[in-house]
Amino acid sequence: MENKYHFACQLIREAGQFIKGRMTSDLDIEEKSGFGDLVTNMDRETQDFLIAGIKARYPDDAILAEENGVTHDIKDGRVWVLDPIDGTVNFIVLQDDFCIMMAYLEDGVGQFGLIYQVMADKLYSGGGQFAVVCNKEPLPVYQERQLAQSLFACNSRMYAQNTGGVRQLLDQCLGIRMYGGAGISMSKVLSGQLLGYFSRIQVWDYMAAKIMGEGLGYCLLTLDGQEPDFKTRQQVMFIPKAKLTEVLSYLKGVTI
Amino acid sequence: MENKYHFACQLIREAGQFIKGRMTSDLDIEEKSGFGDLVTNMDRETQDFLIAGIKARYPDDAILAEENGVTHDIKDGRVWVLDPIDGTVNFIVLQDDFCIMMAYLEDGVGQFGLIYQVMADKLYSGGGQFAVVCNKEPLPVYQERQLAQSLFACNSRMYAQNTGGVRQLLDQCLGIRMYGGAGISMSKVLSGQLLGYFSRIQVWDYMAAKIMGEGLGYCLLTLDGQEPDFKTRQQVMFIPKAKLTEVLSYLKGVTI
C-alpha cells in the first residue's frame, strides 16, 4: 500500500504540471447540466492523464471518475475515485483555487486520499494507515473550538435558500466563506482554518477529504447525519465528529 | 512623488515582515463594535509601525487610520489613509487572506494606493501617475466581459439580506465568492479575476483600491451610483465603470 500511496502522490503532482503547462492554451468550455457546472477540455485531458498513469501501473484496478461517465461500484474491489479539476469555474475565471482530487478504496474501505491545490502547490494527502499531511507537514487532529470563534464555507445556493436550515447554524458562527470549490474548501477544514463545509456534491468531490478527515476527527455526512449514498449528488457537510450533535441541533426540524 | 511612492512600497513590505515575525506570539483579541468586527494588538502595533515610518520621513503629512481614532479630513492637504490589517477575522482564524492597505492623497486627489496580501507576498500598487502593478507585473485595463461569465465577491450579510437588491444582480452572474476581506477581494477585481465586489466598509477599506482602480477602468461608488462620503461606513461597490449602467439597472428600484 505504501508504494501505491507514493505512486498516487507523484501522479497527482505530475497531473498538476500537466495542467499548468497547458494553461495558456485556449479552453473549449461546455455546459454539463446548467449554470455553474462547466467542463473544459482540460478536465477531460487531465482525467485521461490520470487514468493512463493508473492503468499503466495497476491495470486491474477500477476507476470511478467525474468526466465521460467512467464509473464503478465504489464498494467493489480496488477502486480509484478521481476528480481531475475540482472547481472548474475557478479554473476558468480565476485561474486559481482549483484542485485535483484522488481517493483509493479497497472493498469500500478508504486507503488514502489526496487533494492537490495546483496553483498554491499544496498537496494534502494521507488517511487510512498514512498520517495526514500537507506537503509532508502533519495536519492537526481537531481540537474543540466554539462556533462563535469559527468560520464555515458554504455553497452559495444552499446559503441563499437556507437549505436544510444551514443559515440557523451559520448565523452562530464568526463568518462564512465561499471559495467556489469542494477541494479548496475541505482542505481548509483539514488544515484547521475552517470548522466545516456545506455543499451539494458528488462522491469524487468529497471522497478524498472524507478519507483524510477520518484520521483527524472529521466526518462527511448528509445534512441529517447519515452516510451519503456515494452514487448521487447530495447535500453533505464536512465537520468535526465532536460537533455533530451541536450542528444537527441547529439543522434539524427545519423544512427544506 | 516618485520617492514617496517607493517609500510607501518599501514601508508596506516592512510592515508585512513585522506582522509575520510576530504571528507566533499570542494575540489579544477584542470586540470593537460587535460580531465580526474584531481588533487585535497586532492591528494596533502594525498601525503604530506604519505611522512611525511615515512621521520619521514626512513629519508634516496627516494620517487617517482605522485604529485608535487617528483621523483627518481626507480632502485637507497631504493625507495618508491606513488600514494596518484588513481582514482581521481572516488574520485570527485563517492566518491568511489579510492585507495591509495604504493610500496617499493631496487635497483630496488620490496619488497612489497599495494593497499588500501579506501571506501571499503580493503587492498591488500604483494609481495616479503610476502604472498599476502586482509585484511589478502590470495589471490589465478592464476589458468587456459578460455578467454570466463573471464572478463577484460580496459581503455575506448583504447577500443574505439582499441589501440594495444585490441578489438580483448576483443571480445574473456565474458565481459568488466570499473571502472575508475588502483588500483580498478588491485586489482580485484589480487583477481581473472578479468582475466586482459589494460590501459595507469604511474609507480605509476602499481608498487604495479606488485610486488604483481608476487607472484600470474601475469605480468605487455607493449602491445608488454616488461618490461615497469618505467619512462613514457605507454600502459600496467596486465595479468596472463600463458596467455601471447595467449594474444599476439590476440594483435600482429595490426596497432595502
Image: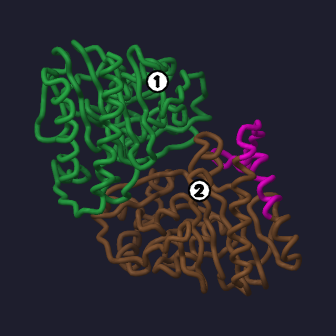
Chain colours: A green, B brown
Q: Quadrant of the C terminus of chain A?
A: top left
User: CB under 8 Å between callouts 1 and 2?
Assistant: no
Q: Residue at x 46, y 80 (%)?
A: B217
Which quadrant of the view contains residue A72? Answer: top left
Disc 1 to disc 2, how far (Cα)?
27 Å
Mark 2, residues whose alpha carbon is within 10 Å: few (<14), some, or many (≥20)? some
Label 2 belongs to which residue?
Answer: B121
Label 1 belongs to which residue?
Answer: A132
Query: Looking at the picture, which amino acid does disc 2 mark?
Result: Asp
Q: Position of residue A11 (x, y in %)?
A: 30, 35
What chain does badge 1 belong to? A
Q: Is residue B123 left or right of residue B164?
A: right
Is residue A166 depicted above or below B73 in this figure?
above
Q: Is residue B148 left or right of residue B92?
A: left
Q: Nearer the viewer, residue A33 or B117?
A: B117
Residue B29 painted magenta: yes
Which quadrant of the view contains residue A206? Answer: top left
Q: Residue at x 59, y 76 (%)?
A: B126
Q: Position of residue B62 (x, y in %)?
A: 82, 76
Q: Nearer the viewer, residue B176 or A15?
A: A15
Q: What span is colored magenta in the figure?
A: B21-50
Q: Position of residue A190 (x, y in %)?
A: 48, 30
Q: Nearer the viewer, residue B7 or B239?
A: B7
Q: Residue at x 48, y 79 (%)?
A: B216
Query: Looking at the picture, which amino acid does disc 1 mark?
Result: Val
